[in-house]
Image: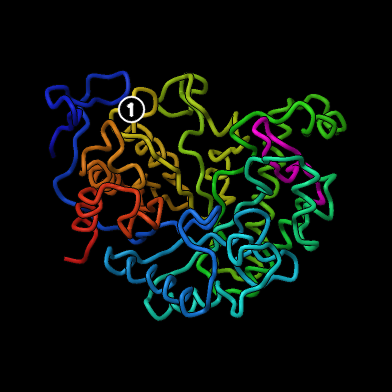
Amino acid sequence: MKELSYYQNKEKKICYFKTNEAVTIPEVYHEKELRAFWVSNVVNSGFPIFENEDQYKKKIEEIFLAAKSFNINNIFYQVRPLNDTFYYSELNPSSRYLMGKEGVNPPFDVFEYIIEKGKEYEIKIHAWCNPYRVSMELQGSKETYLASLDDLNFAKKYPEHLIMDANNKLILNPTRNEVKDFILASMIEIAKKYDVASIHWDDYFYPYAALSEESNDLKDYEMRKDLKMSIGDFRRFHVTDIIKKVYLVVKKIKPNMQFGVSSFGIWMSKENDPRGSNTAKNTSESYETQYADSYEWVKKGYIDYIVPQLYWEFGHNLAPFADLAKWWNDLVEGTKVKLYIGHASYRLGNEGEYENPLEVCNQVKYANNLKNVSGNVFFTYKNFLYKDVSKQGMDELKKLLEKK
């Protein structure tokens, strides 16, 4: 084991949060069962718009070649970026990030093609969905944006079921039964049609920003049956309700198919709840911000796996990586829920500790030495093409992950 030191000040050792205990990194890397990356399609951040079939299939081939070169054996592929699809659907329109215009289908089912390629390369494919997100930040009015959507889009058909955050981003109202029914139907369609390893949701539940004062769920809250319920408990109830329903329906359709969530990396600080992590009191918390009670989901078995996004460095002054990895490892102890750690490969080369090309490698070695960690997931795929990232850092990661 070796002690960690701050990359820019090697004399100063890194300790667990608010302690004098040094963080140590194992010399040996323990390979776990799942090694994965996310392929992001929203705003074409990781993948281009379809131009012609040959070109697009070559781009898909690049995904698998990159995965094999890094010994990646699972891919989380984004199929529902904005209440739309990267697959053929009877319920939702094809994504604007696929063909350049919403509702225009490509000449072949892209997701089915990726699944078949996965079988060819012996790589498991997961259907990554954003449950509520309808738009990025609106540049014009809500009405103008909705008019630009395809007629099949649920948000265009039922604008009364939308709310907005303070940054002018539209989401489906999580408290509405009509919204839950629609989300459930969309997940059922994927589960029935596609041979995927899992239905995968990310951290976009209630938005990170507060809800708009003009467009929110307060009228729904006023109509609640349990008048003793706080607004936070009301929102958490509805988010957890759809989590439970999706889990049950997936198991009914295909018992071996998994359902998992990539949650924000902090549930609560122990300074706010004794069950919480050893992190600062004033950090963002999924329990209070996204109303996502990941603690309950794990303890009650509402999901098959969880991928906390631990995107902070070891020496972070509020939410250090090691403290959080240990907390999640302890959380899943005695449950059936598998723990995969989400790593910020995209930050390699950024100012601070991520300037250290070994930062992510050290995180992987540290996490994989913990008893209950079953794998690692990296954000994002384009970094595995050496785009927008430190080449030296990715070279180190490749050396760590590749088959010996």
Q: Position of residue 21 (x, y in %)?
A: 22, 24
In magenta segment, residue 337: no
Residue bounds of the magenta highlight: 162-178
Question: Which quarter of the picture shows residue 26?
Answer: top left
Q: Secondary structure at mark 1?
A: loop
Report whether 37 appears left or right of 2. right
Q: Is residue 174 above or below residue 166?
A: below
The quadrant the N terminus occupies is: top left
> Residue at point 68% right, 36% down?
168
Question: Which quarter of the picture shows residue 347?
Answer: top left
> Residue at point 47% right, 68% down?
125
The quadrant the C terminus occupies is: bottom left
Q: Position of residue 96 (x, y in %)?
A: 63, 60
> Residue at point 59% right, 50% down?
302
Which residue is disc 1 drawn over? 316
Q: Position of residue 371 (x, y in %)?
A: 31, 47
The image shows a total of numbered marks equal to 1
